[in-house]
Amino acid sequence: MIGMLATQSSTPIIGEVARVLGWLMNAIFAFLSSAFNIENIGLCIILFTFIVYTLMIPLTIKQQKFSKLSAKMNPEIQAIQKKYKGKQDQQSMMAMNEETKAVYRKYGTSPTGGCLQLIIQMPILFALYQVINNIPAYVISVKNTYDALVTGIMSTSGYQAIMEEIGKGKNVNPDKFDYLKVETIIDVLYKFNSSDWANLADKFPNLSTVIEQTADKMSHMNSFLGGINISDAPITNLLSVAILIPILSGLTQWLNVKLMPQPQTPSNAEENPMANSMKTMNVMMPVMSAVMSFTLPSGLGLYWIAGSVFRCIQQLVINKYMDSIDLDDLIKKNLDKVNKKRERQGLPQISASAKTNVRSIETPIKNVAKSQDNKQSKANETSQSVSTGKAKPGSIREKANMVKQFNEKNTK
């Protein structure tokens, strides 16, 4: 038996997260196989996606709490930006930054308040895609299905050139992947659709029996709802039920976007180009999802559908929860946390009713400018005193003045 797994992601952070998610995927597959005698990759993808998104619910709630606060803060922040519009001098820029920070402090949050959740979520989502896209690398039972065939292929003289030629059509470029490794051969075989197995049998006629057995086993694992082979792209058979995959992918993505809370934006689109970009992206995402699901293996489309369906259900629940949250209570809780932290640091407390005091912000800025002017003035005075002031007898300053006077006298 071959003891190595197919190629796992080696990307920093994403690779580590993918290994954790791969362990979960393997556990789900093993549980379904032992408890219900079900070995189905499609069902495993759906359950796996639901579990991972469930674990990310706390991050989603935190992110949407920040969005709710942002809707309250944005009018004040936009007013500050409008106030300093067109002013590029240092004093105005410093004042605008300080006033903006004061608004965030008043609501007990920060400009990066919604970024942390996204920073945590992104590696998880990328790792999730890596696991779905290369299941044999993480699910031992699926990988073991290829063992006998890979052993036969690698025992055949000249196999490397044959597999490299096949791999070129599967985006497993021989310039980047080593075809002397077991993992690379499994990577190529896992990308096979229904018609590729017949081509492999023509290339390795002595392995026709084991090829047929492996193809049947993978067809059983990849069969979903009786008529969809998740290794095939819907574009390869427009008359099959698999054509529903891209349609449902685009539809569920569109529904997911509609259920998401939309940020309040000014009526003048020119004042908020970011809002226009978001609107365009919300339209394009469902279209892109449908197009990609049409051309890629149905398993990836199934993953996108499962994710969108779960997010739709999740969003309905979260929307009800967010509607029940009193914004003033949320601000108060945030302020309590901030004030406890400031108390430990020996800083003054922030009041929920605090107003941005422009005068108090401008004063230190003016003091900085005044201090710089004073330093320059003192430097000028020092320079003047060196050139005209009296010096102590025998000092370097006296000698410098004597040299200066001598030079001035001789140049006349």
Image (spheres, grey):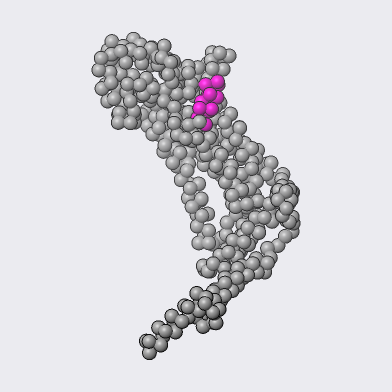
Tell me what residue is drawn at x 33 percent, y 12 percent: 152
Residue 113 location (% of width, % of height): 61, 48
| Nearer to the camera, 111 or 348 | 348
Residue 197 location (% of width, % of height): 33, 19
Q: From the viewer's perspective, is residue 198 above or below residue 319?
A: above
- Left or right, 169 with respect to 144, comes to left
Tell me what residue is drawn at x 72 percent, y 60 percent: 354
- Left or right, 324 with respect to 54, comes to right
Q: Is residue 352 visible?
A: no
Tell me what residue is drawn at x 36 percent, y 16 percent: 150
Q: Residue furthest bottom?
A: 412
State yes or no: residue 156 in magenta.
Answer: no
Q: From the viewer's perspective, is residue 330 above or below residue 155?
A: below
User: In the rendered picture of this protein, how many numbered marks are placed on residues?
Assistant: 0
Q: Which residues are magenta?
A: 17-28
Q: Is residue 99 visible?
A: yes
User: Which quadrant, please, contains the C terminus?
Assistant: bottom left
Q: Residue furthest front?
A: 394
Tell me what residue is drawn at x 60 percent, y 35 percent: 56
Q: Main secondary structure of the magenta part?
A: helix
User: Which quadrant, please, contains the N terminus?
Assistant: top left
Residue 16 location (% of width, % of height): 50, 31
